Image (cartoon, helix red, strand yellow):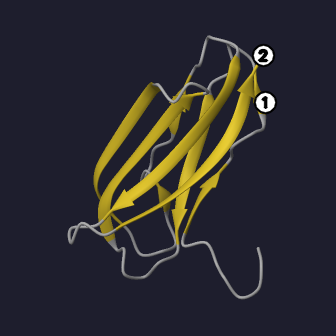
Amino acid sequence: SVGTSHETIKIIGLSSQYTTTNPVSIQVKVTDSSFDCGDLYITIYSSGNDVVTQGGFFEQCFDGKNTLPIDDTFSQVIDTPGSYEIVAEMVSKGLQNISTRGVFTVK
């Protein structure tokens, strides 16, 4: 991280590479205290910006110590080799949102 900026949302457990049989399994950590409840969306895009898969986890209420989704993991097998982007977005009741992204390849 650069300077004093801090990520208020981050993806945990993302590898840079997967196989076509190895699921992409991640959790999300939110450290922004204004987000104590919200809806979590996790979307995987292909290199052509098509949505490959999306998971929605609603009414996630947490105290900043939990990883999200609560007592769960987003897990998806991507069976087509290529380069992908994963985006995690948290939307609060006030419709504020914070998001982060990562990239990975499937071989």
User: In the structure shown, which secondary structural element does the residue marked by tag 2 occupy?
Assistant: loop
Q: Give the residue type that dot 2 points to.
A: Lys
Image point 55% across, 49% down: which residue?
27
**Left or right: where 45 falls relative to 47:** left
Q: In the visual, does 13 lie left or right of 46?
A: right
Q: Which mark is residue 17?
A: 1
The residue sitting at 75% across, 18% down in the picture is 19
Identify the image quadrant of residue 48: top right
Q: Residues at badges 1 and 2 in contact (C-beta under 8 Å)?
A: yes
Q: Residues within 10 Å of mark 2 (few under 14, many from 20)?
A: some
**Image quadrant where one finds the N terminus:** bottom right
Q: Residue furthest bottom?
A: 4
- What quarter of the picture does the C terminus occupy? top right
Q: Is 31 drawn above or below residue 47 in the view shown? A: below
Looking at the rendering, which quadrant does residue 95 occupy?
Answer: bottom left
- Going by the numbered disc 1, the residue's amino acid type is Gln
Vertical placement of residue 16 versus 9, above or below = above
Residue toward you, 78 or 60:
78
